[in-house]
Amino acid sequence: MTDPKTVAILGAGAWGASLANLAAANGHQVRVWSRQGSQTIQAVLKDVQIVLSAISMIGVRDVASQVQSFPLSPETIFVTATKGLDPQTTCTPSQIWQTAFPNHAVVVLSGPNLSKEIQMELPAATVVASNIPTAAEVVQLVFSSGRFRVYTNPDPLGVELGGTLKNVIAIAAGVCDGLQLGTNAKAALVTRGLTEMVRIGNNWGAKTETFYGLSGLGDLLATCNSPLSRNYQVGYQLAGGKSLTETLANLQGTAEGVNTCRVLMQRAKQENIPVPITEQVYRLLQGEVTPRQALDELMLRDIKPEYNY
Ligand SMILES: NC(=O)C1=CN([C@@H]2O[C@H](COP(=O)(O)OP(=O)(O)OC[C@H]3O[C@@H](n4cnc5c(N)ncnc54)[C@H](O)[C@@H]3O)[C@@H](O)[C@H]2O)C=CC1
Ligand SMILES: O=C(CO)COP(=O)(O)O
């Protein structure tokens, strides 16, 4: 346990609400802001020690610039729990927060954390990562409990990209299950998906081993195997013949993988990174291929070694 902190949670969606409950259950003073709520952002931010953003990627840049208008103590720690990429710049959410607040500590919180399970008080673990280890330790104490085990990690970029990139593979996993391709296919997809995540992450400057931890493999397993995942649901519905528009219209909450996939394709082309799974998910989302055609494209690529040692 730690001294009670005053925590502002920005975003009252499924994840913001779950994180607010976890901090409040540990005795912290929690104030939640959302654009639909009655409290102003100024009131929520007054004298806070921690600002946690669980805003969907689409709103992060705008909310960060709103927060810039209000005075904050230089000690205030920013925590970002968004799993997405900025369409204009390909920046991660933590890069946006760090650019907006260059003199503040920024911590990434990411892990296998399906919010519905956390709301049901089922046990889970997560990772908090920062270039400033003491800031990660403060956040670790704020959220740790007997039902939420929080690890620190020194690779914020790797932790953030793990949570972000797995959403694209989760769409593919939903397609795989929707087409009833079997357990062997799913194991191959998830394993090669992880290889693709490591390849992209390394190009970005993240550490390989981070992707084998909770925020990488851990989140990949949770999201690719659970119908609670919105990204998985998108793939599953597409495999069932629904259009993307229809699928997204009926989806509860945000499936960040749809936007992330587009941003990733742009970056992979620029940087010449091979991303076969992401490419087929992209073509499927664009309506350029059917789920079956995407599968054939993946299976019939040139044969090759598993690793280029
Ligand atoms: N739900 C989950 O299980 C988890 C979600 N996440 C991530 O957390 C983020 C939020 O996810 P959810 O809470 O599930 O989504 P949600 O759709 O339930 O809530 C999104 C929140 O962002 C706000 N928002 C959206 N656009 C905005 C804008 N332009 N300006 C201001 N606010 C805006 C909404 O009002 C809402 O409060 C996503 O990046 C997601 O990947 C991460 C871990 C678990
Ligand atoms: O990131 C998540 C679990 O860790 C939530 O996944 P979805 O956004 O696909 O629901």
Image (cartoon, helix red, strand yellow):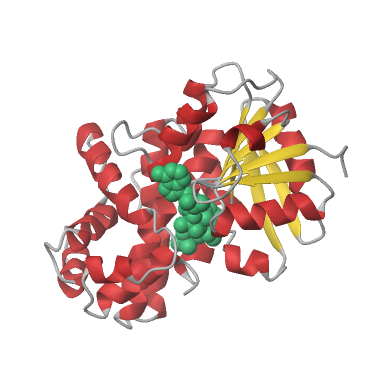
Question: How many marks on residues?
Answer: 0
User: Considering only vertical position in the picture, is 97 above or below 260?
Assistant: above
Q: Residue at x 35, y 64 (%)?
A: 171
Residue drawn where x is 69% and y is 44% of the image: 31
What residue do we see at 44% from left, 30% from top? 205
Nearer the observer, 176 or 89: 89
Measuring from the top left, give residue 133's x and y in whole percent: 70, 28
Visible in this render: residue 291?
yes
Is 285 left or right of 9, judged from the image as shown? left
- The quadrant of the image that shows the C terminus is top left
Nearest to the observer: residue 132 or residue 49: 49
Q: Whole-percent x and y of residue 115?
A: 59, 62
Residue 169 vertical placement versus 209 (above, below):
below
Q: Quadrant of the N terminus?
A: top right
Residue 174, image x, y percentages: 36, 71
Left or right of residue 293, residue 172 in this image: right
Q: Which is more toward the observer, 10 or 307?
A: 10
Instruction: Please identify the residue farthest to the left as the structure is shown.
Output: 288
The quarter of the picture where residue 304 lies is: bottom left
Q: Residue at x 68, y 56 (%)?
A: 125
Q: Is 48 located above or below residue 218 in the figure?
A: above
Task: Determine the image quadrant of residue 271.
Answer: top left
Q: Left or right: 276 with respect to 177?
A: left
- Using the rendered image of the protein, determine whether residue 56 is visible from the camera's viewpoint: no
Asked where in the image residue 251 lies, by quadrant, the reply is: bottom left
Seen in the picture, residue 6 relative to 131 is either above or below; the reply is below
Q: Nearer the viewer, residue 131 or 306?
A: 131
Which residue sits furthest front?
38
Q: Position of residue 78 (x, y in %)?
A: 62, 32
